[in-house]
Structure formats: C-alpha cells, structure tokens
Amino acid sequence: MNPVFRDVLITGVKIAIVIGGMLGVVAYLTLMERKVVAYIQERLGPNRVGPWGLLQPIADGIKLFFKEDVIPAHVDKVLYVIAPMIVMTMAVMPFVIIPFSKRFYLSDINVGILLLLAISGINTYGVLLAGLSSNSKYSMIGGLRVASQLISYEVALALAFVGIVLWSGSMSLVKIVEAQHTIWNIVPQIIGFIVFFIAALAELNRIPFDLPEAEAELVAGYHTEYSSMKFALFYLGEYANLTAMSAIITTVYLGGWQGPWLPGFVWFAIKMFIVLFVFMWIRWTYPRFRFDQLIGVGWKLLVPLALLNIAITAILRIYI
Amino acid sequence: MKVIFYVNAFFSLVFALGVLFGKNPLRSALSLLLFFISISLYFFFAGSDYLGFVQIIVYAGGIIVLIAFVIIILGLRRESPDFDISLRSFVGIILLALFALGVLYGMGKSILHFVPQSPYFDTSVAGIGDAIFSRYLLPFEVASILLLVGVVLAFIFAKKEV
Amino acid sequence: MNTLVKSNLASFSYFVPELLVIIGILALIILELVFKKETKRKFATLFTLATLIIGFIAVIGVGMPKNHQFLFNRMLVYDGVAYYFRILFFLSTFFIVLLSYISVEISEKEYTETMILMLSLLVMMDLLASSFNMLMLYLSLEGVSLLSYILTANKRGDVRAAEAGLKYTIYGGVASGVMLFGFSLLYGLTGSLDLTAIMKNLSGQYGALIFVAAILIIVGFGYKIAAVPFHQWSPDVYEGAPTPVTAFLSIGPKAAGFAILARFFYNVFSNGTAPLKFFPWLLIFWLLSVATMLVGNYAAINQNNLKRLLAYSSIAHAGYMLMGMTFVGHLGLRAIFFYLFAYFIMNLGAFAVVSFMVNKTGSEEIGDYLGLGRTEPLVAVAFTIFLLSLTGIPPTVGFIGKFYLLIGVIFKGGFLYYLLAFIAVFFTVISLFYYARVLKRMYLDPVEELKEVGFGMYEKAYVSVLAIPVIILGIYWQPLMHLIQKALESSVF
C-alpha cells in the first residue's frame, strides 16, 4: 500500500476512534450526572429507558433531534448559527494532543500547553457570540458574564500551567506525562493543582461558578434563545468541555496513563472518571457565588496563589 | 507550502478589509479576530509555534474579547455612516494610493525574496527565554515598564472628574 | 557565564545615573504615603531635586567616554552625544521641577505623581537619546510619548487638559503606528534591528522601498519634534497642559527627538560622511525644514494666547534646527546640538515667565502683560532677553545658535542651500514681529492704571539664573561648542 495513503488511513481511523469514543463518553456523562445527582439527593434517577436507564441518552438525543429548530426573527442569523458550532468544535479540539496511552495519541506538538490555552481562548467566542447574536437581554448578560469569567480565570489557568512547564521542563503533553514517571505532578504542584482545579470549575461554568446560566436570574443564560439541535450542541459542548478538562487534569497532574499492572488506557480512563465524578460531586454540593465574589476569587486569590506556586516551583527546581 | 502561504495572505487581506468595511462594529471585531488568527499562521509557517500560539492567546483570547466588551457595553449596534467623499478625503485617498503603489513597486522588485530568517535566535520556547533574559534583557524590562505606564494612562483617561 | 549576560552586567557601570534616578522614583512612590499633607509639596520637591543632583554628579562621574561603548548587547550606545544629552536632560528636569514647585496649575493632589512622572520621563529620554537598536528605540520613544500624554492629561477637573491629552494620545498613536510600519519594512529588508547592521545590509536594489520606509519613520520622529505636517497636536497640547509641563515638553522630548532623529538617520541612511544614494536626504529635510518654518512663523503671528504663541514658535524653531539635517556632517550636527542647548535656556526662560504670570494673574493672554516693564522691571528685562534670544538677536545665545546653523548650510554651498539660508533669515525677521508684540505690550503701550503683579524673590532669582547664561553664552560660547565638538568626536556619527 502507498505509505502516504496508509498514514492518512491510520490517522483517520485514530481520529474516528477518539471522536467516536469521546462523543460516547459525553452522551453517557449526561446519564452519569443524573445518576450521581439522584444518589446525592437520595433518589433513583432515570431508570425507565433500558436497564438502569442506560438507553436514556439515546432517547434524549432522538427527542432533541426531532424538535422544531426555531431561529427567532430578531437574531443576527450568521453569528447565531456559528456560535454553537464554535463551542462544540473547540470542545473537541483538546483531544488532538491528549495522550491516552503510551503509544496512542493523535499528535504530539512541542507547545501542547499553549494549544490548550489558545483553544480555551477561542472557546470564549462561542458563548460570547451566542449571547450577543440572540439579541435578548438574558442572553446578553449571560454572554457578558461568561466572557468576563473566562478571561479572568484563564489567567489563573495559564499561570498554573507555568508551574507545570517549569517542573516538567517541557510544554509537550507526552513529555509531561513521561516526566511524572516517579511522582505525579499533583504532589510537588499541589498549590498549582488547587488553583487549576478551581479555575477549571470556573472555565466550565459549573457550580459554584455557574453565574452565566444562573436559572434563578437569567432563565438559561447565553443559550436562552436556542432550541433543538443547536441547544443540544451547547449541551453536548458543555459536557465535552468537562471531559476535555478532566482529561487535561489527568494528563497534567495525575500522571496520565501511568500506573502499575493495568494497561495505560485503562488507567487513563479510571483517573478521568474519578475527576469527572469529583466535578459532579462539587456541582451538587455547593451553592453559587455572587458575581463580584467570583471575579474577586479569580484575581485576588487564585492569581496570587498561582504566582506563589511559580516562585516555589522555580526555587524547588534550582535546589532539588 | 507556498500555495498555502498565498491563500492565507489572501484571507488576511480579506479579513483586514472586513475590519474596515464591516457593517456593524461587532462584525468588524470578528474580522479582526480572524485576521489575527491568520497572522498567527505566518508564525507557524516560519516554524515558530510558540509565537503563533502566543499571538492567538493574547490577541484572539484577550484583546478582541475586550474590544467586544466595549462594543457591547457602549451598545454600538448601529451601522456606521457611509463614507463621505469630501475633497480632503479624496486627497487622502490619492496620497494613500500613491503610497501603496510605492510599497507595491518596492515589494514587486523583491517578491521572490522571502523575509530573511532572523539571525539571532531559534524560536523555540527555550530560545526565546534565553533571548529575553540575555540579549534582549533591557528592551524586555522597558517593555514591561511601558505596559505599566499604559495602564496609568488608561486610568487617567477613565477617571470620573474629567 | 554567558557572554551576553556578562555584557549586560558590565553595562551597569555606564548606567549609574539612570539607576539612581530609578531608585529615586521608587523611593518617591513609597515616600508619598509617608509625607504629611501640608509638607508634601516641599519634601517631594526636595527629594526630587536631591535625586537629580546625585544623578547629575553620577553623570559627570561617568563622564565622556574616549570611545563609544555599546551597552546591553548593542541595545544602547554610550558616547559623547549621549553624555551631552544626559547633561541637557538632567538640567532641564532640574529647572522644570523648580518651576513646578510654585506653579498653581499643579495641585497638591497630583504633585508627587507629577514629580514621579517627570523623573520617569527623564530616564526614558536618556534611553531614547542613546538607543542603537530599533526595538529599544521604539520602546523608549513610546515611553517618552506615553509619559508625556500622562503629564498633559493629569490635571484634575480641567477639560482643556483632558482634551489636549486625548488629542496628543490619538495623534501619537497614529504616528507611532506609521513609524512602526517603516521599521518593519526596514527589518524585512535587512533582517536586523541593529542600526549599523541595517546600514550594512541595505542594498540599492530596494531603493523605492527604503525611501518609503524612511518617510514613514520620519512621520514618527517628526511627530516627536513637532515638524510640519505632523505638528497639529502641539498648539492644543501646549495650551492645555500645565505650563511647567508645556515647558518640559518643548525642551525635553523635543531634544530627545532630535537626538534620535540625528542618530537614526546618520547611522542608517548615511555612512558617516555622505548620505546613501537612494535616500534624498537634502530634498526631504529641506522640504520639512521650510514647511516647518513657514507654518510655525505664519501661525504665530496672529496668536493672542502666549502659550499658543510659544507653541508655534517652538514649531518654527524645530524648522530652524532641521536645517542642520539637510546635509551629512559634523557642521550640521554641532549646530543642532548647540541650538538645542540654547533653545533649552531661552525657551525655558520664556515659559517660566508665562508660568509665573499664570500663577499670579491666572491669564495667558498677551494683553495682560500690559505695563509689566514698569511694575516688574527685572522680570520684564529677563523676558525681553529671552524673547530677543528666541528671535536671534546678538549678543544672545539664540543668535549664536542660528549663526552656526546658517554657517553650516552656507558652507555646504549650492543653490538650494543658499535659498534655505535666505528663507531662514527671512522668517527670523518675521518672527521678530510677533515677539516684539509682547515687548511692545510690556513697555510701550499706554497704561492707565498700574496693577501690581507682585513677584517674589523666588521668581526673580529663577529668571535671573536663566537670563544671565543667555547673555554669557551669547558672548563666550566657546566652552559649550568645545564640549559639543569633543562629544561628536567620540560618537558613532
């Protein structure tokens, strides 16, 4: 076979596996979330569609797919249509560079961490545009909130990454995982991890940082005016982001695919699901911040902490 | 590779014009966003991934969001008025056209020579770090002071009592 | 250790004056919190002056180098010219601080800030005058600009200052953007930011493009020195800013602008003795010079606001100084540098009188100078000396400065140069008209009732200290000229 053709084929298959797998995970995350919340609230959760409600996500998907796709008359059509696409695309992008196991990853670029930051930068536009193009006050306030939140917390996120880069001596995710062979980054980078985790919660717009879509104040925030598959895209994008963030945390702080006995892929999945579970656990345990508190936490607590972490890491790097 | 370069150059031009002639400010800001992203591609072509991503993170992820904020908060939704061709702007356009011709003439002569690679550093992260803290230490520090001064200036213009 | 790092560390011994000033700035920022409200102005001034004096001693201590030294890996160059401009900047800042101390236009609230900003501006001007790399050049130029904008706009509750600051900022942003485009063209053509390397790598092949780049760069520099047609900002800014700040802008950043204009064009577009052939040095600076003299002098004729008048006169003086740039050679440079010093003394003196008048009467109109010759003879005489010197009448330093400029142009020979000299003399005569209007108002116009202005010792001493050198240097200018000659010999020009 032609080697170029073979390479393209192999990459194509890999991409198909990653995207397919990820969409599967995302679909079932909705079920997982509902089950988790049900058990936290001492209920059973969905259990009618299939055994233990396992077919529920499929039923939801089909339902959303057949809903009427309403585009309100007062929206800016182009931007309105583009917005959910940006959200979904950018949510899938991080998986391009995440190493799932020792040999299985789509690509390894030497400034991987910067790619992640760039993606999260572009991601802001999805929600911002959704809020703006909808031409409705709830959407707009939601969009504004989400944009200010994202750019505030991105600073903390990036600074936490600096600690990682200093400690591992590389920006490539594959190298970062390899550098955690003896000890996971979560131990020397514990401050960085805390900062990163909180900032990640904010980046994902999850409780206690879910002001952009606070139901009590803003109906549904930036996606108030969306329906049918476009709404589904936002919904899926949110869970895809969640998955991506868990995968990033696993890769960067929890040693990625490294672990004894079991194959790397399994370790990766276990760690990722633990992180996902913690995210859900937090969501259904804590109340929401007020908006000024939210910005205050970002700039007055997380950024200084992240800077402190960088200083400590630098000192450790010199003397250890 | 060359073809991609020219295609990208074409799109940069289109986006840049989009900024100028965009019908509403938000569209202009988005054109600017796309323009910055296409600019970052040049860095990728030049083999400088770091600068390319930093371009996206800083300009696309930060600055355009802030511009969008300003547009939203000021409520600039209306279309900008049509261009008013007065004598003054006419003279300006002619001068600009002459200037563009001059640049094009000069560029035309050197069209086959691409920008020579910077002789100073490798553009990897480590290389840039080295350059910043050794050869370009003073400009780096002065740039940081400059940013601080810029913040002060913004403060002065934004203060409440005139 | 890396040689680059070593070079950085070694450079600090030549960088002591700036370091001292920076330490002073930092200390002042902290001390502002400690000073009591009533004595703040006095202590801030004393501290600033002490910083400047210590810095000045360090400037003299570092002294004039025998050969030029490249600092910070060729980012800066320390040579005789850099030394000369350091002296000029330190002196002008010193006098401006003294002027600000009694100015009513700078209130207590922003006084310490103003001191800090002026010291920062001093550092940036030093950096600008000694830049030898386009990156450094741009950053320090922008630093000077931004600090100037802040100084202009930082006057609480004054609409004129806010408007002036905004205009200044917007014009400045456009000008530096255009200049940056020129820099990027040069960088693209030569692949280097270092001025010498750019000169070596420029080849005639891209003549047209180099010409375009040079024009674009002139926009940026021309903006800094307020040359026509990039001068529109200057009357409004000069009028809107507090008078001490106006005085500072007209002598400090302008001198820095000329320093870098000369340094850049001598090092990039000439090989030290003759201009590179694809850049029509004569044509461009000739046009720039004549246009600047024309607009500056013409617009000054009708001004009734003295600050605006001095703004236009400052444009006109930039035109005179640009004459020295029409050809390559030490004759032109030494004339420009001499004139900058002369201009520093006489213009500062004129602005000082205006500032004192604003303090006492709150007016900048020429009409309000009626009878000053009788009520305040000493200040009026000093003002007369400054104005005559600005016109260029012997035996003042202004005359010597113009004389050197004209000599340079005439020695060069050729029809265009003779014409340029003629035009300059012609405009000098015209300028006598509007300067003499002020004199007439002070001495000749009939006065019905005399109004006491009441200048104290401080004001009288200040103008005397400036007026005496104007006369002395007008008679015995050799030491200054000698210093400039020596400075030029050890410089990269």
Image: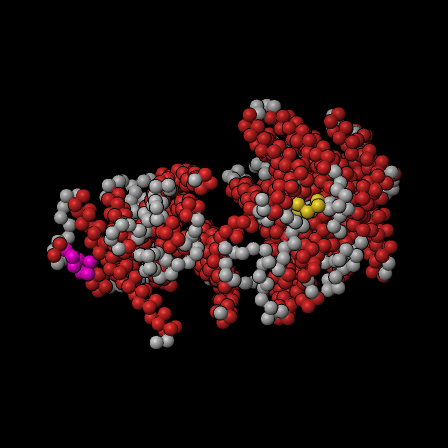
On screen, residue C116 above or below C308: above
Residue A172's quadrant in the figure? bottom left
Q: Looking at the picture, tell me which residue is in the foreground, C145 or A71.
A: C145
Residue A231 in sight from this viewpoint: no
Residue at point 25%, 51% (across, down): A261
Residue at point 75%, 48% (across, down): C491
Q: Looking at the picture, tell me which residue is in the foreground, A105 or A147.
A: A105
Which residue range is magenta in the image? A53-59
Residue B13's spot in the image, x, y percent?
Answer: 52, 66
Q: Main secondary structure of the magenta part?
A: helix
Q: How many marks do you count on the picture? A: 0
Quadrant (top left/top right/bottom left/bottom right) for the N terminus of chain A: bottom left
Residue at point 56%, 50% (across, down): B131
Residue A167's spot in the image, x, y percent?
Answer: 42, 45
Residue C333's spot in the image, x, y percent?
Answer: 78, 50
Residue C466 in sight from this viewpoint: yes
Magenta-colored stretch includes residue B107: no
On screen, residue C109 above or below B125: above
Give the colour scheme of this rendering: secondary structure
Residue at point 70%, 42% (across, down): C252
Magenta-colored stretch includes residue A55: yes
On screen, residue A147 above or below C396: below
Residue A244's spot in the image, x, y percent?
Answer: 32, 54
Using residue A132 as the reference point, say whether residue C392 is left or right of it.
right
User: Which residue extends farthest bottom?
Assistant: A1
Quadrant (top left/top right/bottom left/bottom right) for the C terminus of chain A: top left
Using residue C410 as the reference point, say whether residue C9 is left or right of it.
left
